[in-house]
Amino acid sequence: MLKGKKIVLGITGSIAAYKACYIIRGLIKAGAEVQVVITPAGKEFITPITLSALTHKPVISEFFSQRDGTWHSHVDLGLWADAMLIAPCTASTLGKMANGIADNMLITTYLSMKAPVFIAPAMDLDMYQHPTTQQNMQRLISFGNRIIEPASGFLASGLEGKGRMEEPDKIVEFLDQALASPLTPLTSKRILITAGPTYEKIDPVRFIGNYSSGKMGFALAEECASRGAEVTLIAGPVSTQLSPAYSGLIHRIDVESCEDMYQAATSAFADSDAAILCAAVADFRPATIADQKIKREKDDLVIRLQPTHDIAAALGRMKTGRQLLVGFALETNDEEANAQKKLQKKNLDFIVLNSLRNKGTCFQSDENQISIISADGRRDYDKKPKHAVAADIIDELSDRLTAQSQA
């Protein structure tokens, strides 16, 4: 909760600087106390007088406030704050933060900050995509900072929203959720989750698919977000929606086919600390897709199928020593043997086994019954609501992330 929280708001030289007024309004409305620190370039876009009128505090920009030697203590600000938010944050400031270039009051305050730091980037798409910017962002994340970006993010059709600063109300909501949650092994970790089915087209009106509702994957995404993780949810065609409390905290990518999900997952995995592959991906797709609706003209119809991408195997090959990979196995027979084979073949850290023989679980159901299988053995769980099952799975993931960090 933001009530009573002390927030240092850093503003940099971006055209989006005017949105800082709305952020201040939202923070103060939620009960927070706000101290603005602005870069010299930021003052070219918005005046300190405007910001001071909103916060009822003098705006800090320079090291020295007067010619008599009175100075602003960045150390005191670092001790005073419950959180620091830099919004908008330009590519230049990202670079300075990532490399410790303390040439203005904002950067020295950041380097002295004892509280969590949240960053809302704002720049054009080319600057955002540049490898230097991406490297700086990853370095800041590795330092424990949290990046706030628009939920639209990377879509199957291309990049949308990247570089644009998240809307002020969403930023305030993000801070409210983050500061209400205690630090956990998942705090600031980037978790990739796939959910739902894929549809493989036969013709413009028919497809090969399955009954997956996406409920298990969405429950996992919300559980990770509740523990402070930065979640990317790649969802197949489902009617399931995120709870309003999490919709602004989870980066959702909607896809349709296995090819779409493969492209999105392989792109996002490189920057992830862990991936949970919960989607029921079609194993085969039609070799050819009719461009018109197939008419009933014969007594039989032969559709030749070809394998789709094996997303789990692809990510298993990509996985580095710092990443964890979790798979799902839905079986109808020889459950444990099949799950063990998949665990080893696809380089998974553990696999979640569920069976269609357990009535009232799996597809479309609100409940599930699982076993977690790893190199350490098998652990069986009772039948539970899917949100409780998600907590069991994320407990296992958290334990492994903790062990990894201590190794």
Image (cartoon, helix red, strand yellow):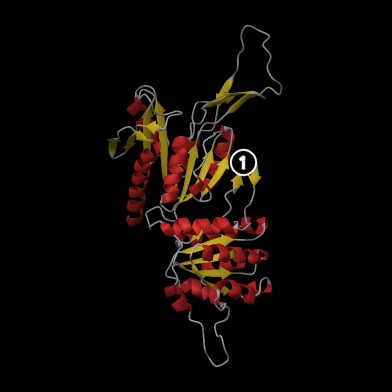
| Residue 193 in the figure: left or right of residue 359 | right
Residue toward you, 200 or 347? 200
Above or below, 167 against 365 in this view is below
On the question of residue 25 being in view, the answer is yes
State how many labels appear: 1
State the residue lying farthest toward the top. Answer: 299
State the residue lying farthest toward the bottom. Answer: 68
Residue linked to disc 1: 156
Q: Position of residue 92 (x, y in %)?
A: 61, 67
Which residue is at a point 49% across and 29% down the rendered structure image? 212
Looking at the figure, which quarter contains the N terminus? Answer: bottom left
Which residue is at a point 57% across and 29% down the rendered structure image? 199
Amino acid marked by disc 1: Ala
Q: Residues within 10 Å of mark 1 (few under 14, many from 20)?
A: some
On the question of residue 278 being in view, the answer is no
Above or below, 17 against 357 in this view is below
Q: Position of residue 149 (x, y in %)?
A: 57, 55
Q: Position of residue 56 (x, y in %)?
A: 55, 75
Which residue is at a point 42% across and 50% down the rendered structure image? 226
Above or below, 177 against 266 in this view is below
